Image (cartoon, grey):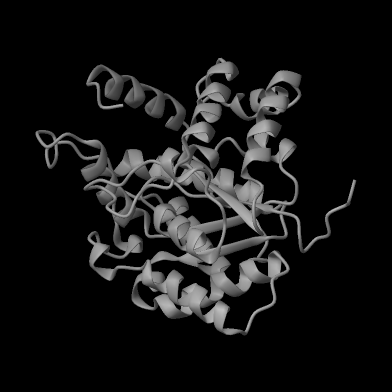
Amino acid sequence: METQTAATVSRPIFVLGVDRSGTSLLSEITYKWGAYPGDLELLAKGNEGNPQGYWEYEPMEELVNKLFDRAKVSHWDPGFGEKLRELASDPDLRRETADLIATMERGPAWFWKEPYLSISMPFWEQVLADPIYVIPVRSPYESAMSYEKFILPPNLRGGVRLLSLFFLRWQYFMLCILEASEKNRSVIYIPYDKLLRAPNEQCERLCAFLDAECGIAGGDNTDRDKLRRMIECVNPQLYRNRATAFSDVTQATPEQKALYDYLLRKVDDPAEPYDAARYPMNGWWREYMENFDLMLGLLNIV
């Protein structure tokens, strides 16, 4: 059997981020770069909340849901990550995961995007070989306003605020992402506001990064066409939730503001050391998130 070289291996790309943080746009750009997203007929379709599509692959989402069910604890539970590590040793789950990954391995790379990938990394770290992480950095306040419009029915919008809830969700997801990314050499952080304002620059950054990671030489007409297709994905008119600077948001904690500042620095210096102790969650966050999930369930919102 012929052994694949580094340049011919189809590498996995995970587009990681919390809800409404720019992962869908980065997924579309990654697709235009040349990564395989799975059968296009099995991708979540666009709607008013995301006209250009969600890029979430149905078979992958089914597997993620199975992992969460098999963990038998809430994803807010402190033992959730260890449960996922244990599941990675289950021979049937490993076989099912390997079979699904085998269907994805086409071209220089393939990718998945789903917010809950971000907090299920303890499983994926055990089964993925040499992954690439693409991570958007968007103001949590902008994401929170978008999340309210996305998740709440029209009759509750404006009357129910989810800012503090979302900031806790964002903080936890980003801490999980950072824990995983610190173990990985192949990571890029893309600032969402700059992507919308200067798509040429940020698409060039991402294109050069993915080309280098996947052993693709650049510089010919095909590459310029590829970059043009990536840039054309960016529609500044969809930037509908510009907001107050996160540093001025009173509902955000000092730790959350410091975490966002750190993520912005990671755009330019991804090697800046990560110290989770600088960004602790408050003491009651797990109970709050559990109770809110129950309330949303009772309202048939999720």
In the visual, does 147 lie left or right of 157?
right
User: Where is residue 116 shown, x and y percent of the image?
Assistant: 49, 37
Residue reaching furthest to the front: 1
- Please give the name of the residue rendered at 39% of the width and 45% of the height, measured from the top-left corner: 19
Residue 22 visible somewhere in the drawing: yes
User: Where is residue 231 shown, x and y percent of the image?
Assistant: 41, 73
Q: Count every numbered label the image shows and give the total.
A: 0
* Displayed quadrant of residue 100: top right
In the visual, does 128 lie left or right of 41?
right
Q: Quadrant of the N terminus?
A: top right
Q: Nearer the viewer, residue 244 or 96?
A: 96
* Residue 112 drawn above or below residue 286: below
Residue 243 visible somewhere in the drawing: no
- Please give the name of the residue rendered at 70% of the width and 64% of the height, measured from the top-left corner: 214
Q: Nearer the viewer, residue 96 or 293?
A: 96
Residue reaching furthest to the left: 155
User: Where is residue 105 shown, x and y percent of the image?
Assistant: 66, 47
User: Where is residue 96 shown, x and y percent of the image?
Assistant: 66, 26
Q: Nearer the viewer, residue 32 or 129?
A: 32
Q: Quadrant of the C terminus?
A: top left
Q: Nearer the viewer, residue 204 or 73?
A: 204
* Residue 178 drawn above or below residue 153: below
